[in-house]
Amino acid sequence: MLRLALASALSLIAVCVAVNQDFISSAEIDIADCPITFYGLKYDKVYVGFDSNTSAVCFNGQFGSGPNSDCILMSRGSADRGSLTTHDTHIPTGSGLHKLLANLKHEGECVNIIPLRDGQDSDVKQIELANFGAQAVVGIKTHSRFSDISFEAQTVVNGQSYVKELFQTNQTDRGVVTDVSGCRLFGAVYKTNTSVWNGHICSTVSCDQSGVASLVSSCKPMERCQGNNTCSLDATCTVTGSTIIDVIGRVHAVADRCGYKLMETQSVPDLQVLGVFSERRRKDVSFIQRVILRLKSSNVHVSLEQGGRVTLDDRMVQFNTSEQIVAGVKITKDSSGITAEVTATSGYAASVHFNGNTAHVRVTGPKPASVSGFCGNGSTTAAAEREAALSDSG
């Protein structure tokens, strides 16, 4: 059985150790004075546990205490080398990085040193945790009383085995250093200086040498990732006051008291969404006054108006419940405003939410599609989208 002790010791990396205390069982260690960044997350505590076969150094609780463990596990070497998912991440003595770490010894750099001792109080293995600039490294060194000819070091990130390495004792007697730098984004883990395609977010994720992740999405502004390498239609337009922000982010200003076609798409072929602008107290500023859903096949107008009112062809609709169907349009009313939804048989749908001051027009569907109108993704002008029947004369 191994016994854990934290004490000043010869370091592979540097020489700053803040703890000098023996532990005879699993321990929680405060490393706030020398925090470690492990695959993009900064930790100020270390949890160390061990049994006769395995020692664990974890950062967010003892190993096995939760599904998202971040740990470094060390156990007796596996007889089946083919069972290991190996990555060439360890840096042996004599390499460039190892020499750089050695040069830090006299510079007072911070390191956490964790010697593991046996029942006779003899050092058998030493684990060191340190940040090297923006990166993080783990040093491993075995001593003369370490009896196994090899051992397996396993990096566990978010509860999943990420890297396994088999070290021979003739390596670790001299000391090895392993890079544990990386990035995390949306639950996925990436090594530094890599770019990886992630189909779950339809993006290429790059993890730079500082452990900062960035992504480039293959989905366009009017689209969202379905999580299976494909992008679907998800276009939203916002109308607030006299300003229209279309589905690709362009800004349009309405300076008159007119009605305009906001949205039309062949994906929801029976629907046009119209906006009517009018002044309120000020005569020189227009505001969105109401939003109309025109059903083209029947020429029916469902209007969402100020004060949460809904009209059907200028007749007030009385609501007995918070949700009802008006001329095939599902209308929902709550404290946030009115929402109207129209669904097409092709799987596409359009919705309008209006609270009296701001309208959100959204179109969704299984595949990308074009949208026209003031909210659309094509070029247009106010004159082209103006609805004369809904506009003041002059």
Image (cartoon, helix red, strand yellow):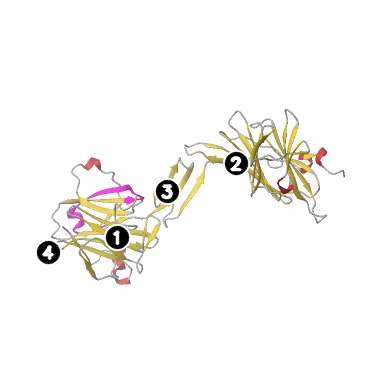
Depth check, front residue: 30 or 13 = 30
User: For mark 4, does the 10 Å Cα neighbourhood hold few (<14), some (14 to 19), or many (20 or more) residues?
Assistant: few
Quadrant assignment, res 390? top right
| Residue matched to label 1 | 47
Distance, label 2 to label 3, CA atoms, is 25 Å
Expressed as whole percent of the image width and height from the top left, the position of residue 53 reads 18, 52
The residue lying at 29 percent from left, 58 percent from top is 138
Expressed as whole percent of the image width and height from the top left, the position of residue 381 reads 75, 42
| Residue matched to label 2 | 222
User: For mark 1, does the 10 Å Cα neighbourhood hold few (<14), some (14 to 19), or many (20 or more) residues?
Assistant: some
Q: Amino acid at mark 4?
A: Gln
| Residue matched to label 3 | 187
In screen coordinates, is 367 left or right of 313? left
Distance, label 1 to label 4, CA atoms, is 23 Å
First of labels 2, 4 by sequence position: 4
Magenta extent: 156-176
Q: Amino acid at mark 1?
A: Tyr
Question: Any magenta on residue 96?
Answer: no
